[in-house]
């Protein structure tokens, strides 16, 4: 009889036995979700709103552009139609207007897009006209083409002088570095073709080159590149390029819908997405906006105890001023402008791409929120389909909310540009190309995104005790410190590990107190935990594109590599020393680019608007002497000066690590005192 009752409940809830933890109120919310509405909105956003010609890719809605504003206008109307109070907040951005790209190879036209933040053959830059061409009053550039392989220093050493030529480069590393190298080598322009094996043959890939704008940079398809390479093998090819690029300053906007909570109005749950895009951006990120609006509708109908925010960020893809970290601009502006929200963010679900048809999804969550996410996956019977990852990354706006704001946030991806998360049905093959359009067969996981988002928001909103698990954070912290200490045995981790242990004990006591109290004391301790998280977590982190990374980890890795290089130099082994040096931060640039490019690349790393500067999250680099030493060692010789040079670099890395340890220990002691 008990068994029959159990399966009767399962059937009533419309799920599997694993879903028995879902309450009737939660099931009602999940049943109210409408994937068909998401599809309809996705198609309108990607096929109708702000869609027009652009040299950056048809349909692109770039930071500060009229197309981006048209999307913001549409989103505001949709939020208001769902009963939200709406505000719009402007913030300054670096703004571009791209004219049509005219690209000819021996007189035959080839489709192309201008890579973002590249210069053009002509245009206006900050009110000053410029012309980089040698025909048509400087508007057209005409020159011979050279195949530069991957565009690295070794390729140019092989092919020789490219002064006054246009170079064809097969993308491997991010295009900014190889665009810089082409300019340093005297090329007049660079034509990129796509990552081999990833994108379809006709894809036109768009990615920013982050102000490495010495020469025009355009992107063509692999199919066209193959034809051109055949022609080059048979003889000379002449290129003609004309592309107008106007650059200046403008404004982007965040669109913010607010529904004031009935019981705890100054604590927040949020759904966030971004509305700017490359090309028509159905997956990146029209569907994200559509999911956000549908979750907002369903949550409003269910009612909210805490205040619910819908935030459509502008300028996620690009728009930063004077920094290589030129993405996440809108979310960074929001977090900086609203500490009262960032410090009271109970939970946010960030949607950047959703529903793509793939067997495996990847769920990223801030470390203290991982137990909360495990319960969601268990209760939705998704543990076998979705991998949970420690921490949010700096690919998406979740980084601003969690890594800068110190709030709780998660996001689900059915694709990634990172090999660890790649799959055979990955969206990455369409990512930032004109092929990112709606196809019904490729949006079969929308129900998963909607249910995971809705259940997380509902539980965070209804929770008497907020899902802040400092014990999970303490365990992650201790594990990271242990690993870093093994890499850097010459540095004392005693103070930092003692502070981490004290924090772990205090977190356990504080959690026990919170579970034992009732009434207003729950609210007081919730607020205390929110404050501690907001003031602690950003100081622990280093920027990362793959997982949560402790601030000390890059410095411990640098010191380990430099120590091994010193030991190799002491043994007179130049090759082993050079190999060890290539593991130091930015040494990959030193190993693959010319010396001049390396120095110029380091300059680009400094930017006043970089979100990595706020909490010392950007990795401090050792002296540029690294590149000189590396090149000498690669030449196969070791001399007496090398030992002194490597010791200086080692001392710098040790100093960086010791300072990071001091900072972590101090912040942990403060957090422990607050919890006590």
Image (tube, rainbow, N blue to C red):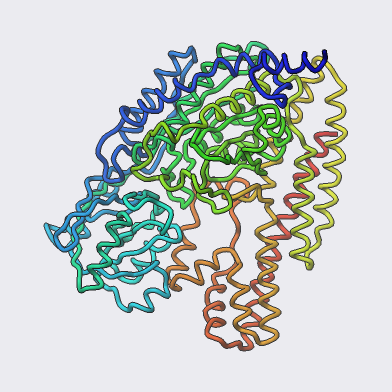
Residue 123 in view in this figure:
no
Please tell me which residue lies in front, 654 or 81: 81
Task: Find residue 405 and report its horizontal and vertical position in percent.
Answer: 61, 36
Task: Find residue 145 and report its horizontal and vertical position in percent.
Answer: 24, 68
* Residue at image coords 57%, 50%: 545
Instruction: Give the quarter of the figure containing the N terminus.
Output: top right
Residue 113 in view in this figure:
yes
Q: Is residue 65 above or below residue 519?
A: below
Query: Is 23 on the left-hand or right-hand side of 297?
Result: right
* Residue 109, quarter of the rendered image: bottom left
Please tell me which residue lies in front, 245 or 648: 245
* Residue at image coords 45%, 30%: 254
Query: Is 185 on the left-hand or right-hand side of 431?
Result: left
Task: Find residue 502 and report its horizontal and vertical position in percent.
Answer: 86, 44
Task: Find residue 72 and report its horizontal and vertical position in percent.
Answer: 39, 27
Please tell me which residue lies in front, 307 or 57: 57
* Residue 148, quarter of the rendered image: bottom left
Q: Is residue 634 above or below residue 280?
A: below
* Residue at image coords 56%, 74%: 625
């Amino acid at each position: 009889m008990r068994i029959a009752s159990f399966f009767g409940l399962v059937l009533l809830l419309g799920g599997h036995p694993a879903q028995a933890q879902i309450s009737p109120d939660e099931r009602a919310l999940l049943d109210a979700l409408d994937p068909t509405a998401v599809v309809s909105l996705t198609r309108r956003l990607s096929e109708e709103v702000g869609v027009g010609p652009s040299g950056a890719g048809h349909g692109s809605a770039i930071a500060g552009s009229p197309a981006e504003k048209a999307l913001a206008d549409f989103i505001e109307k949709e939020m208001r139609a769902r009963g939200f109070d709406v505000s719009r907040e402007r913030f300054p951005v670096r703004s571009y207007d791209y004219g049509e790209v005219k690209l000819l190879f021996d007189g035959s036209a080839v489709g192309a897009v201008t890579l973002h933040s590249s210069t053009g053959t002509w245009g206006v830059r900050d009110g000053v006209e410029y012309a980089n061409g040698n025909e048509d009053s400087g508007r057209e550039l005409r020159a011979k083409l050279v195949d530069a392989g991957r565009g690295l220093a070794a390729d140019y050493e092989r092919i020789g002088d490219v002064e006054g030529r246009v170079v064809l480069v097969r993308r491997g590393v991010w295009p900014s570095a190889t665009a810089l190298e082409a300019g340093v080598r005297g090329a007049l322009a660079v034509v990129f073709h796509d990552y081999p094996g990833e994108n379809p043959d006709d894809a036109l890939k768009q990615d920013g080159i982050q102000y490495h704008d010495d020469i025009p940079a355009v992107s063509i398809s692999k199919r066209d590149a193959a034809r051109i390479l055949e022609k080059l093998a048979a003889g000379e090819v002449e290129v003609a390029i004309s592309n107008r690029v106007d650059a200046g300053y403008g404004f982007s906007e965040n669109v913010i819908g607010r529904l004031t909570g009935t019981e705890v109005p100054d604590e927040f749950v949020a759904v966030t997405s971004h509305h700017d895009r490359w090309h028509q951006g159905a997956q990146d990120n029209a569907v994200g906006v559509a999911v956000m609006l549908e979750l907002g509708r369903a949550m409003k109908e269910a009612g909210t105890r805490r205040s619910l925010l819908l935030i459509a960020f502008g300028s996620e893809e690009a728009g930063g001023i004077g920094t290589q970290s030129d993405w996440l601009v809108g979310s960074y502006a929001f977090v900086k402008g609203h500490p009262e929200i960032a410090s009271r963010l109970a939970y946010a679900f960030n949607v950047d791409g959703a529903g793509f048809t793939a067997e495996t999804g990847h769920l990223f969550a801030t470390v203290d929120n991982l137990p909360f996410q495990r319960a969601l996956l268990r209760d939705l019977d998704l543990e076998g389909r979705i991998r949970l990852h420690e921490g949010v990354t700096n690919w998406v706006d979740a980084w601003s909310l969690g890594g800068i704001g110190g709030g709780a946030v998660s996001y689900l991806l059915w694709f990634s540009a990172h090999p660890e998360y790649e799959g055979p049905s990955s969206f990455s093959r369409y990512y930032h190309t004109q092929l990112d359009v709606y196809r019904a067969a490729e949006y079969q996981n929308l129900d998963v995104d909607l249910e995971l988002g809705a259940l997380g928001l509902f539980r965070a909103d209804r929770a008497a005790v907020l899902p802040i698990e400092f014990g999970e954070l303490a365990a992650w912290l201790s594990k990271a410190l242990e690993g870093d200490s093994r890499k850097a045995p010459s540095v004392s981790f005693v103070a930092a590990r003692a502070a981490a242990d004290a924090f772990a004990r205090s977190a356990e006591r504080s959690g026990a107190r919170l579970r034992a109290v009732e009434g207003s004391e729950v609210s007081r301790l919730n607020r205390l935990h929110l404050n501690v998280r907001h003031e602690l977590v950003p100081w622990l982190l280093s920027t990362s594109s793959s997982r949560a990374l402790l601030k000390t980890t890059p410095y411990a890795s640098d010191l380990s590599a430099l120590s091994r290089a010193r030991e190799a130099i002491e043994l007179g082994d130049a090759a082993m020393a050079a190999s060890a040096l290539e593991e130091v931060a930015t040494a990959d640039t030193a190993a693959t680019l010319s010396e001049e490019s390396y120095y110029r690349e380091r300059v680009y790393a400094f930017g006043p608007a970089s979100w990595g500067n706020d909490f010392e999250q950007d990795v401090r680099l050792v002296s540029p002497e690294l590149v000189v030493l590396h090149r000498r060692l690669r030449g196969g010789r070791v001399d007496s000066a090398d030992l002194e040079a490597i010791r200086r670099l080692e001392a710098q890395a040790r100093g960086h690590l010791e300072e990071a340890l001091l900072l972590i220990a101090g912040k942990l002691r403060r957090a422990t005192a607050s919890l006590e």
